[in-house]
Each structure stands twice: as structure tokens, then as C-alpha cells.
Image (cartoon, grey):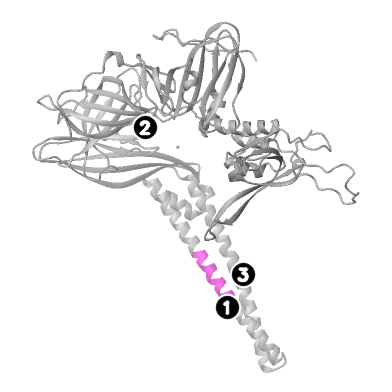
Amino acid sequence: MAPALVHTNPSARRAPLPGRGPLLASVVFLAGSLGAGAADMPLKRVVLSTSGLAQFTHAGPVSGGSTIDLPVRLDQVDDILKSLTVFDALGAVGTVSLPGREPLDQLFRDLPFDAKALDGPLSLLNALVGTEIEIKGPVEARGRILRVTRETIRTPDGHDTTARNRLSLITDRGIVHAVFEDITSVTFTDPQTRSQIDRALTGLMENRAKDRRSLSIGLTGKGEREVAVGYVVSAPIWKTSWRLVLPKDDPKGGMGGKARLQGWAVLENLTGGDWKDVDLTLVSGNPVALTQPLYTSVYGRREEVPLAGTTAPSIVPPPVPHMARKAKAGSPPGGMQDLAGRAQMARPAPPATVAAPMAPIAEALTTETEEAATQLLYRFPNRISLATGHTMMVPFVDREIGVERVWLYQPDLHEKRPFAAARLINDGDTGLPPGIVTAFEMGGDGVANHVGDALLPLLPRGSQKFVTFALDGKTEVRRDDLGVRRTVLGTAVDGKLTTTIRSRQVIAYEVTAPADEDRDVLVEEERPSGWAPAADIPDVETTPTALRRHIRATKGTTAKAELALERIDQQIVTLTTLAPEDMLARVNGLANEGPALKEAIDQLTAVVAEITRARAQKTQIDAERKKIAEDQDRIRKNLASAGQSSDLGRRYLDTLRRQEDQLAEFAKTEQALDDQIAEKRKAAAEIARKMKL
């Protein structure tokens, strides 16, 4: 793959970092500081993001084909494997390696004993049964370990017991026993065994820091040159803390004022290494931040097949494999599905006063601000130092901002009281990130007094947002939602009715000002989707999500005002396809006035009334038919008992004949009613077709 190129900003005031040039290889990425083992490649640049990511760049001179050993944090190795990039204009990356996630498990897998064998000499000897050793002391012998056993013996005075360990060896002279506590030395005579024990002890020593790993980057090339290493890892989010000094409150309000806005960034160094004279950049934005368990071993899933010739023939057809049923057309016929590439991702086994206005930020600390397409960048011109585990607060914005002092009433915040608020107008060149605000107000004596805290939302360039910092306990607001009133107008042509539904919601307010102060209250209501301010209500501010109106009340008086929203919807329906009663309901709800509508309603009312009467007659006939059917069932049962030739039987037969004649009349009447209803429906459709509105 051809190498990519890394471009630097030629207009930047600082010199580019060493090694910026062709990007010869993208490898893995290192978390935290480089530590003492990489003093020749110190941390040069830190970029902290509000997305919870940090970009670090280390740079320094290297010579020839050297190797860089870097300690890394275990919890950030996945990010390391994802993003480490080496910048080397005159060389190339050779190999990059680090121990596995569980290096001790891998180490002891290849040794004849486990980690518990190194808990003590007795455990090690019992783990190496059969190994040849040489012992010295009261008993001197050379042989293979049989076992170390624990035994209890009585003390010489016979009043107590003590425990000791007995070592048994298989020697040329037979089994030799020795009390382990009396042995002065034990020597493993086999060089391979000594090497294995040394490997185990070395591994334990190297992995004493269980949350660290050592990353090794091999570099090729000749001569001395500058190399840089860059990476992105998870890091604490830097926080924004604002100071806002407002001009003296003007009860009449008004635009055009200016406030002093100062922004401070609170950041932490939790990398495990000090930041010494680094270039610091703060980024505010919401980039996509992904992670993946790249440091977890993943194996492909394979299909197990029987050994050839080990299964007896069968006359039962084998079932179709699950994967074969899912195979797409064109797969090799009769073959096993290739599962080697279907690796499953394994899941790996957080009221004060200020004596004077704010002191301006020193010119040397003023940041260079850049607004990119998706984020804001604040670059500090001077280098920053911060010890590991420490927190720092640094200023990054100090400027004037447009402001309007208002009394903002939002019913969601308080039902009866407005808030002292400020409308901030971002008339600067870049946006401002969100954060907590401490607000001060300049008094007549030049002293800035704390008036409250607020939350500043994201303030893009050219936008306006409110910050509310104190409840106005002297002003009372009464809000009355008068509900929604709907007016429906219609036009009808050739049986098609077009209805225009005009909905109007009115909210009434009463604002009572304090006895000694005027109040200009800005009421704000959420703007529902599809609604707009009514044209007959003046002085309404409109945004995509809110509607606002000023209500001015002089001292000690109550001012009344309304905020109205309107919505217009249209619907077209073919009246001739509706039942007459539905036609009547449609036109009866129209607000149109005129003889044409009145005549159509009267005609449809008459038609619906006749259809209703016809249906009522049909309902009555159905009830009588049901009664006759029940009576006939009773008569037939009695007739079977009395017999047809008896006097009672003959009376039963006469009753049945009369009932059958009555049922026949019902059928004729019902048919006539159905014809009448059909005729009235046609008449209703004709009325709708001729109706002109």
C-alpha cells in the first residue's frame, strides 16, 4: 500500500513537530506518557476533546534502526492498537509488538509448573516431582524429588507438638529422607529446569505492574533524525466554566448592550506521566468515537467433520446443514460452508462580591480559535505543564458579547414568576461551547456582585440564547390557556367537498409589576410543529421551536396580553361515496353561511330521517319475525304430541298457515323498505352532487 501524506498547517505560529512528513506506516497507539524509558521522545502536544478523547503526540531524535520501548496502560491498549501512527520522514516502521492480554497465562502454559508453584520452595518442589536436585545440610544427597510431606511430631519434653516438612528423594542408595527445615541448600542440577524457573521469575517481575504493558516499536533507516508518534485514547472530558459580568440592569431592557464573557477550561492529567511544556489544544465538538476489542484474541469458527471411514453406511438422508440452507445461489455444490472467515468477536473477560471587573487574561494566554465544520479548536500559544494526577484551570476566551437584560417567563421553569435573564447575542467570529456560568452584575459603585448561576447552551456564531440566573419574586404572572377553537369552512363541486380547518389556540397572560418598578416581561411558549403565530397579534418573536412576546407593565399595575397560534389543515372527501348520515355530518359542521348550505342541510336531514324511519321499520319486522319463529317451534312440538287429525292438531295447523302468510308479507314489506333506502341514498348523492359552496 502506498504511503499516505500528513499535511501540516503552514500558517500556524509554532514550528511543526519533528518528523512531520510522509506517513510511512500506521501502526498501534500508545496511552499515557512515555515514562522514564522513553525520555528521548517526550510528550510534545496534547489535544483534549469534549467527546472524551485525547490526542497525544510524542517527538524526539532517533538514530539508525533503533527501537522505542513504551509502557502503556492495559485499559487503553485497544485504543493503542487502533490509532498509533508513526511519523518518520527518513525511515520506516519495522515491527511493533507487545505482550498478550494475559502474558503470565501464556508463559506458564509452556512451563511444567503453574504460578502457584512459586508461592514458596515447598510448592515448587512438589510441583517438580521427578526433577533431580542436590541437597546439603545434616543430610547430603542427590536424587529425584519424590514428595515433600508435612508431619506433626512431639517436642522432646512430650508436652507439645510441632509441624515440620520431610523431603523424600529417590537416589542410587534408595529413598533418602531429610527434614526440609534443616536443609541449608537445594540445587536443581538440570540446566533446563533452572532456565524454566528463571523464566517464570523474570515473567513475574516484568508483570508486577498488572495494569501496564510494554510496547516496542522497531524503526528502520540510517542516520539521526526526528520521529513523532501520535495517538488517540480515552481521556477525561475537559469542562467549560464561564464568567459573565453584566452591565447595570436597565428596567426598560433593550438591545445593544455589552457584557464581559470569560471562559475557563478545567482539565485533568490522568495519563500516569507528567506533561512538561506541551502544546495544548482544546476541542469542543461531537465526533464519532468508536472502540473495538482489538487486544482480545479472536478465533474463527470451524465445522467439525467425522473421520473418513469411521461411520457405517446409512439409508437415512443426512439433514441439510444450517449454514448450507442459508447459502446463496452460486455456492459450490455439496461442499462445506467456509467458516474460517466468520470470526466471532469475543467479549473481553468510567453571594460573593468582586471588588472590580474581571482581570483580563494575559495576552500570552489568549488562545487562537478556529471554527471547523464540526468542532471548535482553541490553541494555546504558550506551552503548558501539568503533573500527573493534577487538575488545571486555564482561560481560553475573554471577550465582549452582545447582551439584552430581560425578565423571562417560561411556564416550564416556574408557573407564576419570571426569571432574571440575559439574552446573549454571539456577535463574534466563532461559536461558544456550552458550560456552567457564574453571573455578576456591575453596581453603581463599580463593584461586581454575584447575581446567580446559569447554564450556557451551545452558542453558534450569529445565534442568540438565554441564560436565566435568578427568580423574580416581586413580579407575578398569571397564565390561562383558553384552549383550541376550530373553524371549518368548505367548498363543494361535483360532489367533492374540500374542508379548510382553521385552528386557533389562545393563551392569556396577566403580568403584575412590583409597586416600585416597571417590568418588561418576555413570555416564551413552545411552538408546536405546524403552528404559527396569529397575524393579528403584534410584536411576536418567532423561532423554529419557540414563540415570544413582550408584555410591559408599569409599576404597581397589571398588564394583560394574549399570544395566539394558528394552524390551517385541508381535507378533500368525495361526498357521493359516503352514507347519507355521514354526508350530513360533514356539511353540518361547516361554518359557511348562505342559502345553498342551509338548503343542502335541510334536504339531507329529510333524507336521513326517511332512511332512519325505514331502518326502524326493518328492525321492528326482524323482531316480529324472531317472535313468530319461536312460536312456530313451540307449536310444532305440540303438534307432534297431539297429532294432525285431532281438533287441537287442526288448530295448530291453522295457526301455522296464518303465520306463514304473515312472514310472506314481512318479506314483501322488507323488500319495499330496502328499495326505499336505496332510492333515498341515490337522492342524497344527487343532493351532494348539485351542492355548490
Name the residue beneath numbered marker 2: 544
Secondary element under disc 2, as helix, strand or loop, is loop
- Residue nearest the viewer, comparing 539 with 354: 354
Q: Could you tell me which quadrant the N terminus lies in?
A: top right
Residue 408 is left or right of residue 57, and the answer is left
Residue 294 is left or right of residue 361, and the answer is right
Residue flagged by tag 1: what amino acid is it? Lys
Q: Quadrant of residue 191?
A: top right
Between discs 3 and 1, the one toward the N terminus: 1
What's the distance in space between the residues labelled 2 and 1, CA to CA?
67 Å
**Span shown in magenta:** 613-628
Main secondary structure found in the magenta portion: helix
Q: Label 1: how many residues lie within 10 Å, few (<14), some (14-19) or many (20+)?
A: few
Between discs 2 and 1, the one toward the N terminus: 2
Up the image or down, 588 lies above or below 40; here it is: below
Query: Residue 667, labelled with which disc?
Result: 3
